[in-house]
Amino acid sequence: MNKFNLDSIIRRNVKAMKAYSSARDEYQEINADYIFLDANENPFNNGLNRYPDPLQHNVKSILSEIKNFSAIQILLGNGSDEVLDLIFRAFCEPNLDNVIAISPSYGMYEVLANLNAIEYRKSLLNQTDFQPNLEDVFSKIDEKTKMIFLCSPNNPTGQIIKKDAILKIVNRFTGLVIIDEAYIDFATESSWIEEINNYPNVIVTQTLSKAVGLAGIRLGILYASQNIVAVLNKIKPPYNINQLTQLKAIEVLSDYDNVVAATNRIIQQKEVLEQALTEIYFVKKIYPSDANFILIKVDDANKRYKQLVEKGIVIRNRNNDDLCENCLRITVGTEQENQKLIQTLKTLQF
Ligand SMILES: *Cc1c(COP(=O)(O)O)cnc(C)c1O
């Protein structure tokens, strides 16, 4: 049995501190028949003159239904970025602890580690299949390792990390395993949130920025044990999700069939794009993708990237990422945008 002990990995100052108690924490029912003279708000109603619900009950209640997951085990942040930052601040002691992440992967983990003065240890994926090298991951763990970041499907490689590999890490590592599922809605495999109640050291993060189509409102989601969520609730800024974001999230999530339909259209378009890319002579490799983007290897990534920009199409040059020499990452667009991309790629000479 894994010897994970949440209490022993919480930072001491976090354990000792008391959460800020906001006016809206004490009395939440803004709709009730009370007169609210408690928060120094402006009394004139313009729809946004009141502070938002600090625990976002209505958003969580819809998410809870969609995901079939208990609302009190959900934490929301100003994008995944805030959620990930909160995890660092709750569990990692600056200038002392370290975290491990697969590489190449999402750039924010390293930025947040640097910001929080936490050593960042990279474990290269296997070049052949972009799966974790478990032996290498395990060799990097020491008594100061607090978290392991696994992005699945991984950005920029596009592939899901096999369940079996994650299980081995979750079972053996006695710190937290963060599984970033920003792209899970595009994958055929199921989410790890189904497993959270079996593995108290697992944290899953998702976002409304990709499949749900709301990158502009900044809403990141964390799923974990009730105890982990309680620690993070204690340290988060009280009103971290603004009212406009909460309202828009509720509106869009209320018609989830529409979200699923849009996701399916993107998946379908990805297949069309993958097929078309096989006919471009300088595309050397198309990596399989469980996400809404495709990683390709070309003859000369810097050159092809520049040529496309000159034609008004911006993709991502991943040439400088580990294991990604001459790789480009292409986000799946609308049918029209993808057609334009393909036509443009076909015109690129030499
Ligand atoms: C896009 C992306 C996110 C989303 O971040 P937000 O701050 O929620 O917009 C998270 N993780 C990965 C790996 C991503 O690629």
Image (spheres, grey):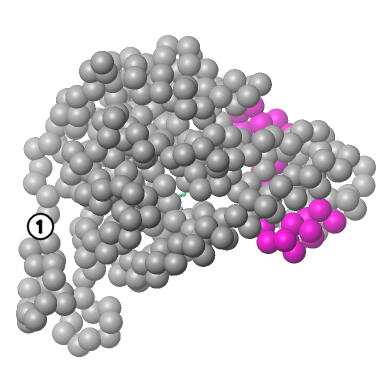
Q: Which residue is mark 1?
A: 21
Furthest-right residue in view?
350
The residue sitting at 28% across, 40% down in the picture is 224
Position of residue 9 in the picture relative to residue 184 (left or right): left
Please tell me which residue lies in front, 112 or 344: 344
Furthest-bottom residue in view?
44
Q: Quadrant of the N terminus?
A: top left
Q: Is residue 242 at all visible to an observer of this figure?
A: yes
Instruction: Determine whether 162 is above or below 274 in the image.
Output: above
Residue 217 picture quarter: bottom left
Position of residue 113 in the picture relative to residue 156 (left or right): left
Residue type, label 1: Ser
Position of residue 245 in the picture relative to residue 278 (left or right): left
From which residue to which does the magenta span run?
320-343
Residue 256 picture quarter: bottom left
Q: Is residue 156 at all visible to an observer of this figure?
A: no
Query: Quick check: is 197 in the magenta stretch?
Result: no
The residue sitting at 41% across, 59% down in the picture is 218
Residue 118 x/y as whole percent: 34, 30
Element under disc 1: loop
The residue sitting at 22% across, 49% down in the picture is 72
Position of residue 145 in the picture relative to residue 216 (left or right): left
Query: Quick check: is 326 in the magenta stretch?
Result: yes
The residue sitting at 36% across, 67% down in the picture is 250
Residue 53 x/y as whole percent: 21, 65
